[in-house]
Amino acid sequence: MSSYRFLQLVSRSVPRAAAYPRAVYLSRPCVRAMSAGGIPTDEEQATGLERKVLTGLKKGEDPFNVHKPKAYPGTKENPHIVPSINKQRIVGCICEEDNSQIIWFWAHEGQVDRCPQCGAHYKLVPYELPH
């Protein structure tokens, strides 16, 4: 017996909703329509740390250093700024633009430190974590 003939027999003997339960379910209108409030925005459904970041960015703050840091020339008078919650921090310097080697050295609070290879200057500044 072909599947088409089987469906004809079933549709005659069984009520339509029972014979095709998926078709009835899929034909119902979507409950979460635009008239019911629409799809929530990122801010409405964000929680925890993501919510702190989104509200901080909306206020114009950079709560967790998400943005790219401001570029400085790296001279002794105008060094690269390195924010840190500690008194010292390891800094990595890529001396040339297409160089794949990173030169690592320590930066200490209260002094201007210099990259041992290229001579760029770095200054460690205190950074307060958001509450």
Image: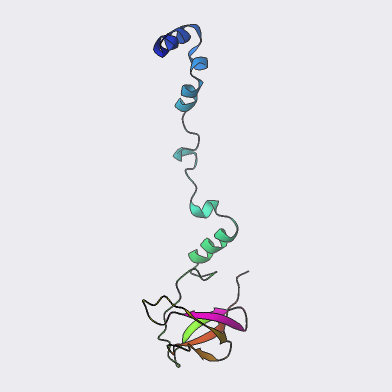
Question: Which range is magenta?
Answer: 83-95
Closer to the camera, 98 or 110? 98
* Residue 90 included in the magenta stretch of the image: yes
Q: Quadrant of the N terminus?
A: top left
Res. 111 image quadrant: bottom right
* Residue 92 included in the magenta stretch of the image: yes
Total labels drawn: 0
Tell me the residue at 49%/24% (across/down): 22
Q: In the rendered view, how is the structure colored? A: rainbow
| Residue 87 placement, left or right of 26 | right
Tell me the residue at 51%/71% (across/down): 65
Single out the residue that lies furthest toward the left: 98
Q: What main secondary structure does the magenta stretch of the protein show?
A: strand
Res. 75 image quadrant: bottom left
Closer to the camera, 110 or 59? 110
Closer to the camera, 18 or 54? 18
Q: Quadrant of the C terminus?
A: bottom right
Res. 124 image quadrant: bottom right
Question: At which x and y percent is residue 104?
Answer: 51, 81
On screen, residue 3 above or below 107: above
Question: At which x and y percent is residue 3?
Answer: 42, 13
Question: At which x and y percent is residue 48?
Answer: 60, 58
Tell me the residue at 46%/78% (across/down): 102
